[in-house]
Image (cartoon, rainbow, N blue to C red):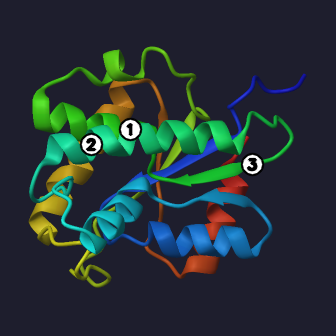
Amino acid sequence: MRPQPGTRHVILSGCSGGGKSTLLAALRRRGYATVEEPGRRIVAEQMRGDGDALPWVDLEAFARRAIKLAIADRAHAGPNPDSWVFFDRGLVDAAAALAHATGAPVASTLADHRRFHSQVFLTPPWPALYQTDAVRRQTLDDSIAEYHRLVATYEQLGYTRIILPKVDVETRADFVLQHLY
């Protein structure tokens, strides 16, 4: 039996600075389709101009823009039931950011959108990796609080949460691929 459309769309989520983008790159090198994090693309675009849809300026505007971009990313990825597609954050994380900013229920934001693969892979807080930069300005403590919100959000939505081990990126990629069903 073939999976339903979208069920091979896998989310990599978790703590900022936990190695999601590095893992995504490793999966891309192995030939898998990947989708970059909407938030980092939005921040880069906003910083090139004088935009205010930055998470540290206007979290609601940022989250709404991330939702739109994530919806477009998902449509572009297509529902190919034969190939895994890995998303660095995406729609659920953007909906969680909007909920944090405004109180809008995540389930309501996602109501018109199909679910992702039932397993979500979460990068735990990893202080040894964490760095701030021009795009990631939140403190480690803020990132840890965000991580806990995301874990709770995915639990409330009924996803199977798989916490990634703190190991090198190739071992992490192997772990993800071995745990997919």
Percent coordinates x, y for residue 123 in the rendering: 40, 61
Q: How many marks?
A: 3
Residue 149 placed where, x, y %? 22, 42
In which quadrant of the rendered view does residue 50 lie?
bottom left
| Residue depicted at 87% across the width and 26% down the height | 2
Q: Is residue 68 above or below residue 4?
A: below
Tell me where residue 150 appears, x and y as whole percent.
Answer: 30, 43
Which residue is labeled 3 in the image? 84
The reply to whether residue 39 is in sight is yes
Graded by Cα atoms within 10 Å as few (under 14), some (14 to 19) or many (20 or more), the crowding at tag 1 reads: many
Of all residues shown, which one is farthest toward the front? Answer: 49
Give the structural element (helix, strand or loop) at label 2.
helix
Q: Label 3 crowding class (10 Å Cα cut-off): few <14, some 14-19, many 20+?
A: many
Residue 30: which quarter of the image? bottom right
- Precedes in sequence: disc 3 or disc 1: 1
Q: Which residue is mark 2?
A: 63
